Amino acid sequence: MPETLAPDAITGLILAGGRGSRMGGNDKGLQPFRGLPLAMHALLRLQAQVCMVMINANRNLAAYEAFGVPVWPDADPLAYAGPLAGFATGLTHCDTHWLLTVPCDSPLFPLDLAQRLGQGAVDASAEVAMARVGGRTQPVFCLLRADLLESLTCFLDGGGSKIDAWTATLHTVEVDFDHPGDFENVNSLPELRALEQAAPSPAPTVR
């Protein structure tokens, strides 16, 4: 049995479909961070870890399409139905065996995220692997088997909306990471500026 999943088994999905209400309604993924939009940082970090990347966005689609990867809105883009709607969108368009989701507002996530979640999923024969740091689960950093679309659709059709409520019905493993700062997210412009001024993180390389 392999120790982890090969990159060509994983599609990356950047979740950029929110309202940005705590950021004054601004589209978080397009806010500048160290000279690039937040979502571009996520794209560059994912491209080094998976075979392809998609973006889930519900507005400013042309701006995201300029990143050069596929962009898919939710089934009902005006509903802003949350991360699980983005998961469903990603699973609908996923052509690999696994889907790795990351938010657009955490520009410093680990460069070995896919490798470590993949190893955790393989070791536990799990359907889902989630990141955990400092004892706290990070549910939007989630590696999903691509055949879970039917399960997720049934959950959403039944009125479900919480990631952990859905993954609790599945064989889910949590994978520990060591540095909480790697998963720092921003919800406001002051938080964005504060993170920008923090110690620099190693830059990802583009494949």
Image (spheres, rainbow, N blue to C red):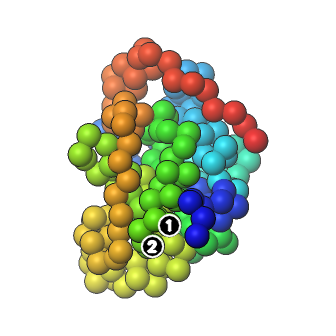
Image vertical order of residue 177 relative to residue 144, above or below = above
What SS does tag 2 mark? Answer: loop
Quadrant in the picture for residue 6: bottom right
**Alpha carbon of mark 1 to alpha carbon of mark 2: how far?**
5 Å
Residue type marked 2 = Ser
Q: Total label count?
A: 2
Residue 15 coordinates in the image, percent (x, y): 48, 53
Asked whether the beta carbons under mark 1 and mark 2 sit within 8 Å of each other, the answer is: yes
Image vertical order of residue 4 relative to residue 40, above or below = below
**Residue 122, labelled with which disc?**
1
Image vertical order of residue 101 relative to residue 176, above or below = below
Residue 127 coordinates in the image, percent (x, y): 44, 73
Residue for badge 2: 125
Q: From the viewer's side, name the closer residue of 18 and 126.
A: 126
Image vertical order of residue 125 relative to residue 114, above or below = below
Q: From the viewer's side, name the closer residue of 4 and 101.
A: 4
Residue 73 coordinates in the image, percent (x, y): 54, 62
Residue 69 coordinates in the image, percent (x, y): 70, 52
Q: Residue at x 48, y 44 (%)?
A: 104
Quadrant in the picture for residue 80: bottom left
Residue type marked 1 = Val
The answer to whether one can see residue 81 in this image is: no
Q: Residue at x 29, y 78 (%)?
A: 169
